[in-house]
Amino acid sequence: MNSDNQSFFWNSPKNFILLGVSDRPWLERPLFVILLVSYILAMLGNIAIILVSRLDAQLHRPMYIFLSHLSFLDLCYTTTTVPQMLFNMGSSRKTISYGGCTVQYAVFHWLGGTECIILASMALDRYVAICKPLRYAVIMHHSLCQMLVAVAWVSGFGNSLVQVTLTVQLPFCGREVLNNFFCEVPAMIKLSCADTAVNDATLAVVVAFFVLVPLGLILLSYGFIARAVLRIQSSKGRHKAFGTCTSHLLVVSLFYIPAICMYLQPPSSYSQEQGKFISLFYSIITPTLNPFIYTLRNKDVKGALRRLLERI
């Protein structure tokens, strides 16, 4: 083993201490209850969306193929982080192993990159449905949907591979206190004792590509959608067309606003205190709200849920 590898293993702690809200112990109990309730709701809501999308023949359409993958992503988001957070809040020593930490941020970046492409695919589906309704079945065929889903998962994996490869090479010089609820790449970079200019630049470029390019396509799609909707003569028709897009726009906002605040800021202005609460928001609040946004505003999903409950 060469000296560089020996130095790397020597400087990498076996465990990290996750501070969470250790500086505010009075917050631990109410936060534990909020996390537990949110996790249960996220699990139930997203599993219900996946089941009705798969079992109800009326939902075997492109939009619900993408929606079922979005729900699966949300399930993975919460399961990757929340059980560990709940366990740590009930323990006096809030630790996670180096390997467990690596798995957390690897999976997190994989899911994040995948979700960016899935949300862009959903915007494409709404654009074709509203702007090209007569050609919808021809354009948004099953093979195209499967290809878009495959591209999303492979792209997300590529994003994770790049970030993990660079982050695992960082030395920590015995520093083991991570001021976060779970392991994330920006927090890991901040903790390292080495020059992290390459990591900071790579993170900024890769995240900008995965966040800004899909977001630009989503906004472009909705620009065309808004123009098409405004040309509809009847107010009822306009309301119906806008109604099919509102849920998706809410989900896009809940995902992209925290992601931009977290990742697209100069490293010098990164605040661990601010970052950990933004992380908490998109790791549990967003996955919990998404299924309710789609069920409360979508007649098709509500009808499918009602039929599934009647069958049970």
Image: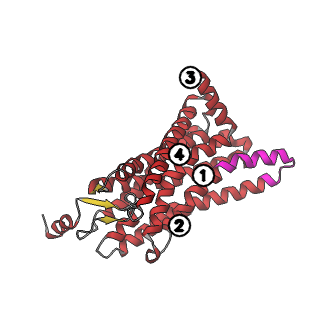
Q: Residues within 10 Å of mark 1 (few under 14, many from 20)?
A: some
What amino acid is at disc 1?
Val
**Residue 106 in which image quadrant:** bottom left
Which of the two labelled residues, at mark 1 and mark 4, occupies the earlier sequence position? Answer: 4
How would you classify the magenta stretch by its main secondary structure? helix
Residue located beneath label 1 in the image: 251
In the rendered structure, find residue 86 and report the number of the disc placed on it: none
Q: Is residue 282 visible?
A: yes
What amino acid is at disc 2?
Cys
Which of the two labelled residues, at mark 4 and mark 3, occupies the earlier sequence position? Answer: 4
Q: Residues within 10 Å of mark 4 (few under 14, many from 20)?
A: many
Which of the two labelled residues, at mark 1 and mark 2, occupies the earlier sequence position? Answer: 1
Residue at the left extreme?
1
Question: Residue 202: x percent and y percent?
Answer: 41, 69
Residue located beneath label 4 in the image: 70
Q: Was residue 244 drawn as part of the magenta stretch in this picture?
A: yes
What amino acid is at disc 4?
Leu
- SS for tag 3? loop
Q: Is residue 89 left or right of residue 216?
A: left
Question: Residue 148: x percent and y percent?
Answer: 53, 47
What amino acid is at disc 3?
Ile
Is the C-beta separation of discs 3 and 2 under 8 Å? no
Is the C-beta separation of discs 1 and 4 under 8 Å? yes
